[in-house]
Amino acid sequence: MQQLLKVGVRSLAIMVFAFCAMTLPSIAQVSSSGYSLVVTTGYETVYPDTTHRDNIYIFCHESGNLSASLADVPGELTFEWFQYDSLQNTFVSYSGPETGSSSSVNGLGNGGYRARITNGDGLDTLFMAWIFINNPSASANVVRHDCQVIDLLGEVVAEDFIYFNPLTSGRYVLTDEPAFSWEADPFVPVASRPDPRVWNPPPVETSYTLTALYLSCTAKNTIIEDPVATRAGFEFEPGEGEAPLEVMFDAGKSLNASEYQWYFDYRTGDLDTEPPDDTTPDPQYTYYIPGEYDITLRTVNGLCDDVFTHPEPVRVFPSELEVPNVFSPDGDGDSDVFQVRAVSMRDFRGIIYNRNGRKVFEWSDPSESWDGTAAGGGIASPGTYFYVITGLGWDDREYEFTGPLYIYRGR
């Protein structure tokens, strides 16, 4: 008889009965090996000096065995084995007789087995034990899978063990409530229950393995579930610098995404009302205005989406313009050129005049410098010069510097 048992973590409920009938008031010894669990029957056989319950030996997915002996009885013994016939409520011959100090039977299937032990001195003793070959099977299924959850359902098909009291023909059932556990690869926590729910489903292919434990025997089943959800993630470089700052973005940390929506200056808090700045996986973006910028990526896969805002903002340095106060183009390696320090400048212009008001050098790239060479390529003579330097930062800050510049040359 097979019964579909939905899994759960409940107490083991075993209803068992056993039989042991003897013509002498001593109880024969019976044992087994290689079993997974042994329980005693629920029915009892009452003797003048004891109450006895027989054993039920439970084997997992393999045949059973029994051995009989009477260690306290010397001499040669005769053993004969019988199998219980529930239809006729009687025992039929199974094997033997054989002589020796002990006897074993192997390859046993479900049922009750009795051994009769005799000798030539009037000993005639019976014992009985039950064998249950437990073959549970498990099934695992996904009953719901959407952007938020996966609902799993585990079931086990197991055979109830039916046995009888040979003295009364009473029918008894050995059954159990299975205990189940789940494992996920890659790992996500799954509760040990028949119908666990997994929140925030993984955005990668995941195998779920169900292990059912029924009367100490296990059954396993594995299912592989394709991802539905998506996960957003990205890196960028550089993280800071002067304007204009070109930043490279890499969505390689995103998983299971079919669409990418980038927001390079995310401030509104409502992505549904703001169009994305870019929709490619690995965009480039140039920041011109100094400040800090929070970067957000939303990935989409079907009806599922995920939003990730990087914990570190992009930092664009504010504008700066500094003019040196020392210049000595004498070739000693110290202040040999006249060069400004400029950060995040949108416009720049520098002009140097001699004391007669004649322009001797002009430049528009703040990374350039004046080495004391006059217009036409000659060496500027020692003396006083004047500079006029103006600039406009990307943050709209205006700069203007004027002042004298002295050139000293050694002999």
Image (cartoon, rainbow, N blue to C red):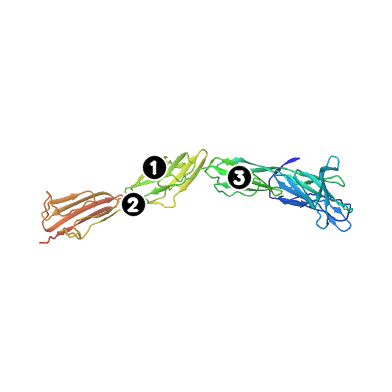
On residue 241, the disc is: 2
Please tell me which residue is depicted at 48% across the width and 43% down the height of the picture.
255
* Whole-number angstrom distance, CA of label 1 to CA of label 3: 40 Å
Counting residues from the start of the chain, the first of labels 1 and 2 encountered is 2
Q: Quadrant of the N terminus?
A: top right
* Position of residue 249 in the picture relative to residue 8 (left or right): left
- Measuring from the top left, give residue 167's x and y in whole percent: 87, 47
Query: Which amino acid is tagged 1?
Result: Pro
Q: What's the distance in space between the residues labelled 1 and 2, CA to CA?
A: 18 Å
- Residue type for callout 2: Gly
Of residues 297 and 35, the one nearer the viewer is 35
Mark 3 neighbour density, 10 Å: few (under 14) some (14–19) many (20 or more): some
Identify the residue under disc 3.
209
Q: Along the line of sight, which residue is nearer the eye, 259 or 86?
A: 86
Q: Nearer the viewer, residue 185 or 361?
A: 185
Please tell me how crowded label 1 is: few (under 14), some (14-19), or many (20+) other residues with Cα within 10 Å.
some
Mark 2: few, some, or many residues within 10 Å (few <14, many ≥20)?
some
| Kind of residue at disc 3 | Thr
Disc 2 is placed on an element classified as: strand
Left or right position of 353 against 63: left
Quick one: which residue is furthest to the bottom in this view?
410
Helix, strand or loop under label 3: strand
Q: Are discs 2 and 3 less than 8 Å apart at CB? A: no
- Residue 324 in percent (x, y) is at 22, 58
Q: Image quarter for residue 340?
A: bottom left
- In front: mark 2 or mark 3? 3
User: Is 167 on the left or on the right of 38, as rendered?
Assistant: right
Q: Which mark is residue 283?
A: 1
